[in-house]
Amino acid sequence: MLQVHVLRRAATAWLVLLLGTVTATGALAGDGRLRVVASINDLASIAAAVGGDRVEVTAIARPGSDVHRV
């Protein structure tokens, strides 16, 4: 149980760090959810898992693309 709490806290802190560059203007979707744009699908999955229904996540890279060329 303690590990889950620590991992969730670390993931939340990481997401807050990532979202620290988001500006207030245009950061909210029309339904009030926070817009998150991730470079690769793995990061988009993490953001969606942490943010849940409070975020609208978009990945820049297409599924299966070479992440070193995004």
Image (cartoon, grey):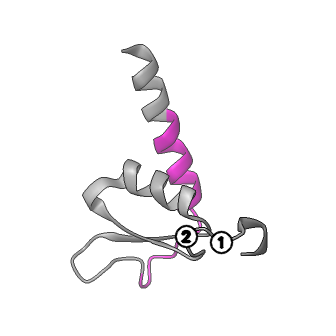
Which quadrant of the figure has residue 54? bottom left
Q: Position of residue 66 (x, y in %)?
A: 72, 69
- Judging by the rendered image, the residue that carries numbered circle 1 is 65
Instruction: Spot the residue most to the front.
Output: 64
Amino acid type shown at disc 2: Pro
Picture disc at residue 63:
2
In depth, the one of 58 and 61 nearer the eye is 61
Which quadrant of the figure has residue 52? bottom left
Quadrant of the drawing holding the C terminus: bottom right
Instruction: Spot the residue most to the left.
Output: 31
**Do callouts 1 and 2 mark residues in contact (Cβ within 8 Å)?**
yes
Provide the secondary structure element on which disc 2 rests.
loop
- Dot 2 surroundings within 10 Å: few (below 14), some, or many (20 or more)? few
Residue found at x 47% / y 25%:
6
In depth, the one of 59 and 8 nearer the eye is 59
Residue found at x 36% / y 15%:
1
Instruction: Give the left or right position of residue 59, taking residue 64 as reference.
Output: left
In depth, the one of 8 and 42 nearer the eye is 42
Residue found at x 55% / y 70%:
63
Q: Position of residue 5 (x, y in %)?
A: 40, 24
Mark 1 and mark 2: span between their CA atoms? Answer: 6 Å
Region of the chain picked out in magenta, as a range? 10-26
> Relative to 4, does residue 33 appear above or below in the rendering?
below
